Image (spheres, rainbow, N blue to C red):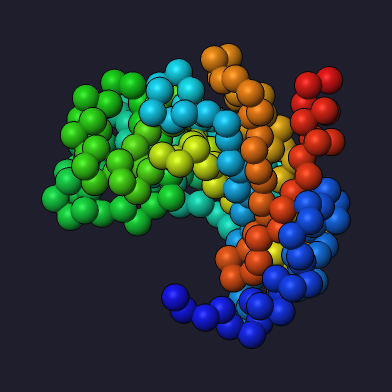
Amino acid sequence: MRKAGKNITKSRAAVGEKPYPLQEAVPLLQKVKFAKFDETVEVTMRLGVDPKHADQMVRGTVVLPHGLGKSKKVLVIATGDKVKEAEAAGADFVGGEEMVEKIQKENWTDFDALIATPDVMKSVGRLGKVLGPKGLMPNPKTGTVTFDVAKAVQEVKAGKVEFRTDKTALVHVPVGKISFTPDKLVENATVVITSVIKAKPSVAKGKYIKGCTLSSTMGPGISIDTSAVEAAAKA
């Protein structure tokens, strides 16, 4: 096993293993940072669900109040007036069948989100093998299959993120950059955690939030005490 470097070992020691409320965890994460670049901050939650069952899959989207610190590149596949609507809303790439062919023939995925209108999904559906593994396949449940392309583009540009349980019942969601002010990161993280709590499947039994960690790209994971957020979400 590869030995941890001095910087991460020192950071982990400063953090310890006790859980912190978000208001304390964020400044601590910023204090122990050692990377030379503007790291992405992420919330990871371990849920008490069984992802093998479709009715226990936790999935949804949320618009971060302070964005992600970068502008996402958006592709819209549509026809007719919806093409102009997408362009006016600020989409980076817009097209119809030619975009489907470009992705299919060139494995082109130089975008962060794909929005499609329902009438082109028959063509877009052929792209599952290319887009699926990268998490780029549009889905009505996440608002990326819609005729209201302007709203969809604006939400993605504003900082809309998707959350979804993986095979091990973990949810990983970016909540901003380490350079954000503490208040902005706390608010973004709170919105994400609250959204995941409210997406609890009705069939899920027992403890739902089994663990929550705040981390940066290179930094240590800080255990989060979510009791205050859970109480507020249920109020």
- Which residue is at the front of the view, 83 or 229? 229
The answer to whether one can see residue 67 in this image is no
Residue 200: x, y in percent? 60, 23
Residue 63: x, y in percent? 63, 37
- Which residue is at the front of the view, 3 or 154? 3
Residue occupying image coordinates x 82% and y 28%: 231
| Quarter of the image that includes the C terminus | top right
Residue occupying image coordinates x 17% and y 55%: 106
Left or right placement of residue 88 versus residue 182 in this view: left
Left or right placement of residue 161 versus residue 177 in this view: left
Could you tell me how many numbered marks the image carries?
0
Residue 144: x, y in percent? 44, 31
Examine the rendered structure and indicate whether residue 140 appears above or below residue 110.
Answer: above
| Quarter of the image that includes the N terminus | bottom left
User: Residue 79, located in which quarter of the rendered image?
Assistant: top left
Examine the rendered structure and indicate whether residue 187 appears above or below residue 59.
Answer: below
The answer to whether one can see residue 233 in this image is yes
Residue occupying image coordinates x 58% and y 66%: 217
- Which residue is at the front of the view, 198 or 159? 198
Residue occupying image coordinates x 50% and y 38%: 169
Examine the rendered structure and indicate whether residue 167 appears above or below residue 195.
Answer: below
User: Residue 81, located in which quarter of the rendered image?
Assistant: top left
Residue 100: x, y in percent? 22, 40
User: Residue 120, located in which quarter of the rendered image?
Assistant: top left
Left or right placement of residue 179 versus residue 74 in this view: right
Outermost residue on the left side: it is: 105
Outermost residue on the top side: it is: 202
